[in-house]
Amino acid sequence: MNQQVVLDWFDQNKRDLPWRNTTPWGVMVSEFMLQQTPVNRVLPTWSQWLVQWPTALDLSLAKKSEVITAWGRLGYPRRALRLYESARIIARDFNNQVPRALEDLRTLPGVGEYTAAAITAFAFGESALVLDVNIRRLFARVIDGVEHPTPSPSQIERKLRFELIPADGAKWAAATMEFGALLCTSKNPSCEECPWQSQCAWRKAGYPPTDQIRKSQEWIGTDRQCRGTIVQALRENEQLSLTALVKMWHNNSQIEKALKTLIADGLIETTGKSYRLAD
DNA sequence: AAATCGGGGCA
DNA sequence: TGCCCAGATTT
């Protein structure tokens, strides 16, 4: 994969979002608001929020009723209360500075795997495995050849996406996210404008709809069938990469389980990068 | 894994 | 109505 294509596209087409140039606290507020709420609806509320409470300490001194009111119509107001509680913790335990360490971020209420990685990348400019719905959909299409990603990322998906991160991991996260949000959209993607259209696996496959793959377990098949598919593929090929195996089955978590059991049973072995039949 | 968030907006 | 949205948490 040529990562530079997306990085160049990002330089030319990125939106001028206010949280691209702000404090770590500003980034953290944006990430809370953007959890399941579209960018355009967050914009005005975010600007007003940072004028009212420029730092975590400022928010920690507010009343709960003020916080709920300022959240406006963003939805899921429990996010506002988690941000409020996180602000109090940051003010009390972190000297009013958003913590840099991933493990510290994860202790804050409302900061899950995605948000911790996003703050690492967007607030501190450090490389992190950022997997939001936009990025996951982009890779599902270009690499895996399916329309939609699975409901939640598996260990194998994390590993494969981690291996794609180039030197500037923070820019990579922003660029792929913007790409998914503006071009590789969930509905009506702009494939004709996509710089990756010639190598997109989903396009090559004829844009098959994958709602059934995503939502129906029966369509995928049993764990036993998954193991059989892997073994048969390894009989026909000397060795296969994880990418190749995932393409074959499309259900990452099931592949992951099947590979573990096959290794435990001594049927296959791995070098870390590829798999082959055991002697 | 699946439901829930005492959600909201748009086609 | 159904789908989508820079997810997190609980059971």
Image (cartoon, coloured by chain):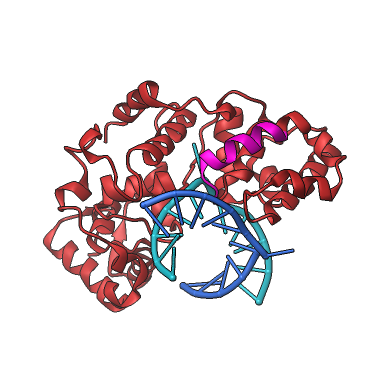
Chain colours: A red, B blue, C cyan
The image shows residue A13 at horizontal and vertical percentages of 37, 25
Q: In this view, does A142 lie above or below A231?
A: above
Q: Residue at x 77, y 32 (%)?
A: A52
Q: Which residue is drawn at 33% across and 26% down?
A: A9
Q: Is residue A220 above or below residue A195?
A: below
The image shows residue A77 at horizontal and vertical percentages of 69, 54
Question: Magenta region's main secondary structure?
Answer: helix
Q: Residue at x 63, y 42 (%)?
A: A102
Region of the chain picked out in magenta, as a range: A36-49
Horizontally, residue A137 falls left or right of residue A114, namely left
Q: Residue at x 86, y 46 (%)?
A: A63
Horizontally, residue A259 falls left or right of residue A14, namely left
Q: Nearer the viewer, residue B10 or A26?
A: B10
Q: Is residue A225 above or below residue A6?
A: below
- Is residue A13 part of the magenta span, yes or no? no
Q: In which quarter of the image is the C terminus of chain A?
A: bottom left
Residue A99 picture quarter: top right
The image shows residue A87 at horizontal and vertical percentages of 78, 42
Q: Nearer the viewer, residue A51 or A263?
A: A51
The image shows residue C2 at horizontal and vertical percentages of 40, 67
